[in-house]
Image (cartoon, rainbow, N blue to C red):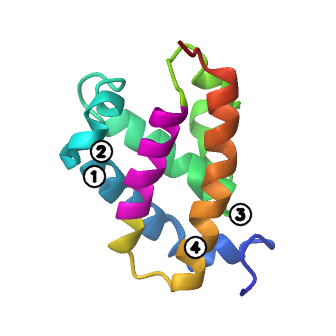
Amino acid sequence: MADFGKFDGSYIAAGEEVGVRKLVDEFYTQMETLTEAEHIRAMHKGDLATIKDKLSLFLVGWLGGPRLYADKYGSISIPQAHQYLVINEVERDTWLLCMTEALKDQNYSDDFKEYLIQQLAIPAERIRHVAKSF
């Protein structure tokens, strides 16, 4: 694999901020259109503009780009930020499905798509461990 995960290699592979925002837009399109994602879309009430901005800015920094999220919104612990939600295996897997489908629409290398979904599965699992479960 290329230099994904080293310095800003993943950020560059994602197309920098413009590419990350495109991915996030498509991710939420998938969340709104996939029948199996209706229950996780319902977790995000109303307009998605702020949540899209937050996810985009978080991913920019997470991928090795500038720390734009902290500059705008302050520090965040992703698992703690989701602890009030009910997230079990189904919700985790559905979130990852939306991201997998969104990646199909991106002009990323297949290696980067595979790398990215593997990396995103790590915080998704951490969120599941911290979130409410029933």
Q: CA distance from mark 1 to mark 3?
A: 25 Å
> For the magenta stretch, what is the residue range?
89-101
What residue does disc 3 label? 64
Amino acid beneath label 1: Gln
- Label 4 belongs to which residue? 114
- The local secondary structure at tag 2 comes to helix
Between marks 4 and 3 in the image, the one whose residue lies nearer the viewer:
4
Which circle marks residue 129 in the picture?
none
Tell me, yes or no, whether the two marked residues, 1 and 2, touch with CB atoms within 8 Å. yes
Between the residue at mark 4 and the residue at mark 1, the CA separation in whole angstroms equals 18 Å
Residue 91 relative to residue 65: left or right: left
Q: In the image, is 65 to the left or to the right of 47?
A: right
- Residue position for label 1: 30
In magenta segment, residue 12: no
Instruction: Tell me where residue 69 appears, x and y as whole percent.
Output: 60, 43
- Looking at the rendered structure, the kind of residue marked 3 is Gly
Determine which residue is flagged by label 2.
31
Q: Earlier in the sequence, mark 4 or mark 2?
A: 2
On the question of residue 22 being in view, the answer is: no
Residue at point 72%, 72% (across, down): 8
Q: Is residue 114 above or below residue 111?
A: above
Q: Earlier in the sequence, mark 1 or mark 3?
A: 1
Q: Residue at x 80, y 73 (%)?
A: 6
Judge the density around disc 2: few (<14), some (14-19), many (≥20) Cα neighbours within 10 Å: many
